[in-house]
Amino acid sequence: MKKIFKTPIVGVASAVLLVACGGGDDGAKTKEKNIEDAAKAHGIDLDATVDAKGDTEQLEIKQGAGRIGKNLNLPADFPEDVFISPDWNVMGTTPVPSGGYSIQSLSGDEADVIVKLVREKMIAEGWNEISADSPMPQMSRIGFEKDDRMASFNIMENGAMRMVQMVTMTKP
């Protein structure tokens, strides 16, 4: 009789704990749907990704071919030989004429660390550095070319973060 009585109690306790903790993935899916529905009510096409803890991992607002949001993936046809650090929070991707892209991201690294990393990675991919300067105290630029393409990185202070803007395209 004791064993029969203990089984339902354990089952009920487990169910209460599961509901109280948000139900794991079901809670995340519900939060994703709530975020997406709220955006849709304002005419915004948004995809949300929420982890099991309920933290928002990724937000993606679709506007034509461009994307804005948080922790975006690079476009499927983004050139593999153009460096974008996986540690940067990609916040915007926009196609530009001639089959290129403009990518906006945030980095916690200092500007000189970003410039050094970009330089190393781009040169390793066969790009030639054509320019590097700091036209104002809180901005650094570095440009590259390879074959008939060019890539330019602008790194700007943004509080505790650095905004990294990259454009790659066919040379005009």
Image (cartoon, helix red, strand yellow):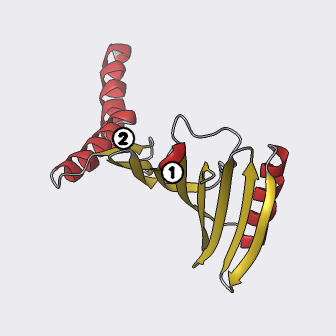
Residue 3 horizontal side relative to residue 168, left or right: left
**Figure check: 107 above or below 90:** below
Is residue 120 visible in the rendered image? The answer is yes
Q: Nearer the viewer, residue 157 or 14?
A: 157
Q: Residue at x 62, y 56 (%)?
A: 88
| Location of residue 59 in the rendering, given as x and y in whole percent from the top left corner | 40, 50
Q: Quadrant of the N terminus?
A: top left
Q: Are marks 2 and 1 in contact (CB under 8 Å)?
A: no
| The label number, if any, that marks residue 28 in the structure image | 2
**Figure check: 57 above or below 4:** below
| Residue sitting farthest toward the bottom | 137
Image quadrant where residue 89 sits: bottom right
Q: Nearer the viewer, residue 54 or 18?
A: 54
**Figure check: 14 above or below 63:** above
Q: Residue at x 17, y 55 (%)?
A: 42
User: Earlier along the polypeptide chain: callout 2 or callout 1?
Assistant: 2
Image quadrant where residue 77 sits: top right
Q: Amino acid at mark 1?
A: Asn
Name the element at disc 1. Answer: loop
**Label 2 Cα crowd, 10 Å radius (few <14 / some 14-19 / many 20+):** many
Q: Quadrant of the C terminus?
A: bottom right
| Location of residue 53 in the rendering, given as x and y in whole percent from the top left corner | 45, 46
Measured in 3D between alpha carbons, the distance from the residue under mark 2 to the one under mark 1, in whole angstroms, is 17 Å
Q: Amino acid at mark 2?
A: Ala
Question: Which residue, given by chain and number where applicable, does mark 1 sit on?
Answer: 71
Image quadrant where residue 48 sits: top left
Q: Residue at x 71, y 41 (%)?
A: 81
